[in-house]
């Protein structure tokens, strides 16, 4: 066989071009140019701002119900000083968690100090942003708060707070960690420091801790008078401008500042200039973090995963697709937008009635706040809080706190548009998308935000984003049912049958055992992982049906089954007197009319708490106590 042995040229190598994955490239400007004509010609939309929240009626089932204490506090175990780092709302997290920890440990909280950060560069103190006097007053019966450590304590540390023992606590530590590790040191030193403190407490915590978080965030923390006054003025101006829509306006939290674009590592359409600007910004804000050896940054993968901040153009396209026409008044909450002259032009073209705080306020009104990023953010927060629609475009503490606060004010519904950014990445990268198809996708996304506006908190969720059910109660239930369901939700022993009563048990209530109590931990704080009162278990002589109240310093009414046949001298071993200091009990009975409480015959007796050792005040090591009921 003859084989041809010719020469083969190796100069030409075939080039294989890889097509970028769908959603990995920023092509939103091209899509906007394609959709613009049809979008502007579309007159089929009903006024979106008045029809958007079809599921908000569900929220009317809930109302705020944060219980305050009305009794004095026991002697403090010591002082806690925390350093709140981050921006406005990360600092807010630290403040609320510090209140919860201090209350749990029965400690006195020093007004938190705000850490100066190279990114936010805001030297503001607590009283510059929040009403310090109101904060202290609102919590006076729950947590003792002071603005100065006593001189005799600071003398031990040469009047220098840096000499105070500092705990370096891991992020998301449990409240039990504070009890087991922090409390002993607090009792020894009488003052401790925790720095940094952001995100140093787990979201999953006992009811006593959650109550303090609710109280601090939704009731005690109010902005300082100057911020409140200016914020309310600008809200009034927004409502006046949007009078044709009934004073309703849309607020958008836009995160397209230079530091956010740099941190995201996403690539947009700014070319070499953008690349140079972002490299400088990353080195300036996070020295060496993005240039570590072995670190690989994949902008395309970041975009596909929905992690890139939405551009002003993309926000405008999304809102127009959701049915908001160009007459809609929009308030834009943001810092200094990157390359604003170019990037903001399409958004202003789509929504010419857009406003910012700089446009609403005069230069004289804003002058005291311009060099303070947290105070400016507080003004944005106030205006967004009172909008009919809030649009979040990037994660972070600002939108999370706002969603929770709006739920607290709007009966449980956040009235917030939370776009699916993974889906948006695919849609914005589709050059063949038509206006009708795009609009249909956006309306579906809007409807999804409406249906998800009302959500209950799960164990891993933030109470600052999901206030139901820890900070809110159902309005369509009686007080008995609310408290009963709350107790059964938080205490797994109801579902496991330890109390011998099903939640839906319809047994008539004809007898009430009322216990007034003062709940105290081993060291005088509010710290146990059990409910404030462990109900009497069922047995041959009757069981528990519901709990009408379980707030920490209130009277507790325990309805019992018919004919409980409580006998003189009976011992209730399951009442943990070691942790629940009962003051007195009363048995209220009536043979037939459970609702006529005012007519019931009352027998009252005072009972001293006792333990197996016979001590009148039980040690915290005791696992159970006995109550002699002299009826």
Image: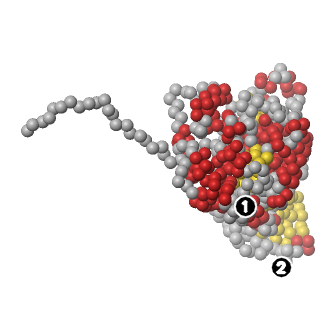
- At horizontal 86% and vertical 69% (from top left) the residue drawn is 588
Residue 278: x %, y % from top left: 62, 31
User: Does residue 214 appear to the left or right of 12 in the view shown?
Assistant: right
Query: Of discs 2 and 1, which sits in the foreground?
Result: 1
How packed mark 2 is, by other alpha carbons closer than 10 Å (few <14, some 14-19, many 20 or more), is few
Does the residue at mark 2 contact the one at mark 1 (Cβ under 8 Å)?
no
Residue 127 located left or right of residue 448: right
Q: Residue furthest top?
A: 158
Q: How was this image coloured? A: secondary structure
Q: Which residue lies furthest to the left in this view?
A: 1
Q: In the image, residue 308 lies at what x, y percent?
A: 61, 42
Image position of 458 (left or right of 628): left
Residue furthest bottom in the image: 592
Report the residue at 21% width, 30% height from top.
7
Residue labelled with disc 1: 48
Q: Which residue is drawn at 85% across and 35% down?
A: 369
SS type, badge 2? loop
Using the image as rendered, state which of residue 268 and residue 64 is in the foreground. Answer: 268
Numbered badge on residue 170: none
Location of residue 374 by image quarter: top right
Image coordinates of residue 586 in percent, x first then y, are: 86, 64
Q: In this view, does 516 lie above or below 340?
A: below
Q: Is residue 250 above or below residue 18?
A: below
Q: Is residue 567 above or below residue 84?
A: below
Front in this rendered view, residue 216 or 403? 403
Q: Residue at x 73, y 48 (%)?
A: 252
Mark sitting earlier along the chain (2/1):
1
Q: Name the residue under label 2.
A: 592
Residue 108 seen in the figure: no
- Assign the C terminus to one quadrant of the image: bottom right
From this viewpoint, is residue 112 visible?
yes
């Amino acid at each position: 066989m003859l084989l041809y042995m010719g020469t083969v040229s190796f100069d030409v190598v075939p080039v294989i071009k890889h097509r970028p994955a769908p959603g990995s490239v920023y092509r939103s400007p091209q899509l906007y140019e394609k959709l613009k004509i049809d979008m502007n010609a579309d007159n089929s939309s009903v006024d979106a701002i008045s029809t958007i929240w079809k599921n908000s009626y569900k929220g009317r089932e809930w109302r705020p119900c944060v219980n305050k204490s009305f009794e004095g506090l026991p002697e403090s175990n010591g002082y806690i000083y925390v350093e709140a780092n981050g921006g406005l709302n990360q600092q807010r997290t630290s403040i609320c968690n510090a209140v919860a920890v201090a209350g749990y440990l029965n400690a006195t909280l020093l007004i938190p100090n705000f850490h100066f950060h190279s990114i936010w560069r805001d030297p503001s103190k607590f009283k510059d942003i929040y009403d310090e006097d109101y904060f202290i007053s609102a919590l006076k019966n729950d947590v003792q708060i002071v603005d100065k450590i006593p001189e005799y304590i600071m003398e031990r540390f040469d009047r220098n707070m840096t000499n105070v023992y500092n705990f370096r606590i891991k992020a998301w530590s449990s409240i039990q960690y504070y009890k087991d590790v922090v409390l002993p040191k607090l009792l020894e030193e009488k003052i401790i420091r925790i720095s940094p403190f952001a995100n140093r407490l787990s979201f999953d915590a006992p009811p006593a801790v959650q109550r303090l978080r609710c109280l601090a965030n939704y009731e005690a923390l109010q902005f300082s008078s100057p911020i409140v006054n200016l914020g309310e003025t600008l809200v009034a101006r927004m409502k006046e401008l949007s009078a044709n829509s009934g004073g309703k306006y849309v607020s958008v939290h836009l995160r397209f500042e230079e530091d956010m674009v740099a941190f995201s590592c996403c690539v947009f359409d700014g070319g070499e200039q953008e690349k140079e600007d972002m490299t400088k910004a990353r080195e300036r804000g996070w020295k060496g973090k993005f240039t570590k050896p072995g670190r690989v940054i994949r902008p395309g993968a970041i975009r596909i995963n929905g992690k890139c901040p939405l551009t002003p153009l993309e926000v405008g396209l999304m809102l127009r697709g959701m049915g908001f026409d160009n007459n809609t008044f929009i308030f834009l909450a943001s810092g200094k937008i990157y390359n604003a002259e170019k990037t903001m032009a399409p958004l202003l073209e789509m929504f010419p009635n857009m406003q910012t705080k700089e446009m609403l306020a005069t230069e004289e009104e804003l002058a005291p706040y311009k060099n303070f990023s947290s105070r400016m953010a507080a003004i944005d927060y106030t205006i967004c809080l009172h909008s009919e629609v809030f649009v979040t475009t990037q994660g972070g503490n600002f939108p999370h706190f706002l969603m929770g606060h709006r739920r607290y004010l709007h009966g449980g519904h956040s009235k917030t548009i939370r776009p699916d950014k993974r889906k948006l990445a695919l849609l914005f990268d589709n050059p063949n998308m038509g206006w009708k198809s795009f609009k249909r996708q956006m309306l579906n996304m809007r409807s999804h935000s409406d249906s998800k506006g009302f959500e209950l908190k799960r164990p891993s969720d933030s109470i600052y984003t999901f206030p139901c059910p820890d900070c809110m109660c159902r309005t369509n239930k009686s007080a008995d049912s609310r408290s009963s369901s709350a107790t059964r939700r938080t205490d797994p022993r109801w579902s496991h049958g330890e109390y011998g009563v099903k939640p839906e048990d319809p047994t008539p209530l004809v007898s009430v055992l009322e216990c007034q109590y003062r709940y105290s931990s081993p060291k005088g704080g509010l710290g146990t992982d059990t409910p404030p009162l462990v109900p009497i278990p069922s047995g041959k002589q009757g069981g528990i049906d519901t709990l009408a109240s379980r707030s920490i310093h209130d009277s507790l009414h325990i309805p019992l089954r018919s004919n409980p046949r409580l006998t003189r001298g009976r011992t209730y071993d399951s009442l943990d007197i070691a942790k629940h200091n009962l003051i007195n009990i009363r048995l209220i009975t009536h043979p037939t009319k459970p609702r006529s409480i005012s007519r019931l015959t009352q027998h009252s007796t005072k009972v001293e708490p006792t333990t197996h050792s016979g001590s009148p005040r039980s040690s915290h090591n005791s696992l159970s106590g006995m109550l002699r009921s002299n009826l």
